Image: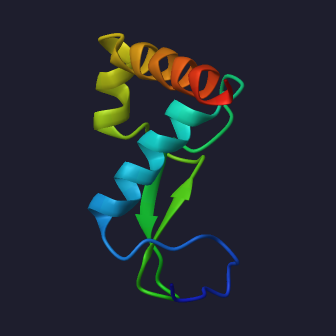
Amino acid sequence: MQKCASGKRSYATAALAEEALLEAHIHFTFERANGPVTFYLCEDCGQYHLTSKGPVNERLAQLIKNGELARLKEAQAWARRLNKK
């Protein structure tokens, strides 16, 4: 993984950044208007970073709207519980 002067985690492709964005929302709980909402191409390192600024990523917005994100979060929570036993 290439280091960026920003210190942010870098993703080589937009697809990888989008997956990381969705995974972050599945695995973590963010307060309203907090946490990553999209990704951008960094002019310094040429890779992608997550950001909490800007419009919500279209795929993330769709998962929220149709309830799929909540189902994925619940499935992840159950997987964590079952793995602890």
Direction from residue 40 to residue 7 in the image, left or right: right
Is 58 in front, or is 8? Answer: 8
* Residue name at image x 50 percent, y 46 percent: 54
Direction from residue 50 to residue 18 in the image, left or right: left
The quadrant the C terminus occupies is top right
Name the spot of residue 64 as percent of width and height, x first.
Answer: 40, 19
Name the spot of residue 52 as percent of width and height, x first.
Answer: 60, 46
Label total for image: 0
Name the spot of residue 6 as percent of width and height, x first.
Answer: 68, 79
Vertical order, 60 against 77 (above or below): below
Quarter occupied by residue 12: bottom left
Vertical order, 19 against 14 (above or below): above
Vertical order, 6 against 9 (above or below): below
Direction from residue 35 to residue 48 in the image, left or right: left
Quarter occupied by residue 35: top right
Quarter occupied by residue 82: top right
The residue sitting at the front extreme is 85
* Residue name at image x 51 percent, y 74 percent: 10
* Residue name at image x 67 percent, y 87 percent: 5
Q: How is the image coloured?
A: rainbow
Name the spot of residue 62 as percent of width and height, x first.
Answer: 29, 24
* Residue name at image x 56 percent, y 54 percent: 51
Vertical order, 46 against 72 (above or below): below
